[in-house]
Amino acid sequence: MERIAIFPGTFDPVTKGHESVVRRALPLFDRIVMAIGMNSAKTAMFPIEQRMQWIRDIFKDDPKVVVKTYEGLTVNFCKNEKANFILRGLRTHSDFEYEKAISQMNLSMAPEIETVFLITEPAFSAISSTIVREIIRHNGDVSRFIPKGIQLK
């Protein structure tokens, strides 16, 4: 059976932390789907097409990484994609507590889907899309927080 992982997020914008988690997870899976969730509670800074293109550009040399969008529960998207894993990166203790609760709920809804956590590299532990967006709003330089080649418009 193919080992498929869903890496859900808004990726608004994609960060070096996201890229690092995916690159480190590649040896573990046959395919990683970076799944951009459509969250009605969040207003995105960047259009979904732009976020998808950034991900395609970052991983253009790795056919194991694909990008898709979805609405609804992540476990339902996993079932549609025949994925048995959800990939999550953990930056902080509070990330762990939040992600643990979600993973336990997901497991109760879909026991066949396991959540796999990777601890973020120390260099990227302070980087979040939320903080990067705030820096952008105030005309700061985010080049050291986002993957090379990503042009913010």
Image: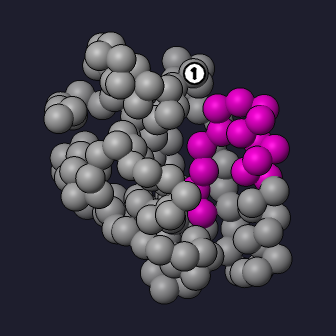
Q: Is residue 100 left or right of residue 64?
A: right
Of 65 and 39, the residue lying toward us: 39
Q: Does the magenta run of residues contain 110?
A: no
Q: Which region shows up in magenta?
A: 86-100
For residue 56, say whether it is visible: no
Query: Image point 82% across, 77% down: which residue?
Result: 108
Toward which corner of the image does residue 137 lie, by quadrant? top left
Query: Image point 59% across, 32% down: which residue?
Result: 120
Q: Considering only vertical position in the picture, is 10 above or below 139?
A: below
Q: Is residue 64 left or right of residue 60?
A: right
Q: Considering only vertical position in the picture, is 8 above or below 130?
A: below
Q: Name the colouring of the figure.
A: one colour
Q: Residues within 10 Å of mark 1 (few under 14, many from 20)?
A: few
Toward which corner of the image does residue 70 lie, by quadrant? bottom left
> What residue did someone put label 1 on?
126
Residue type at mark 1 is Ala
Which quadrant of the rendered structure holds the C terminus? top left
Q: Position of residue 143 (x, y in %)?
A: 28, 19
Q: Position of residue 65 (x, y in %)?
A: 33, 58
Asked which secondary structure carries label 1, the reply is: loop
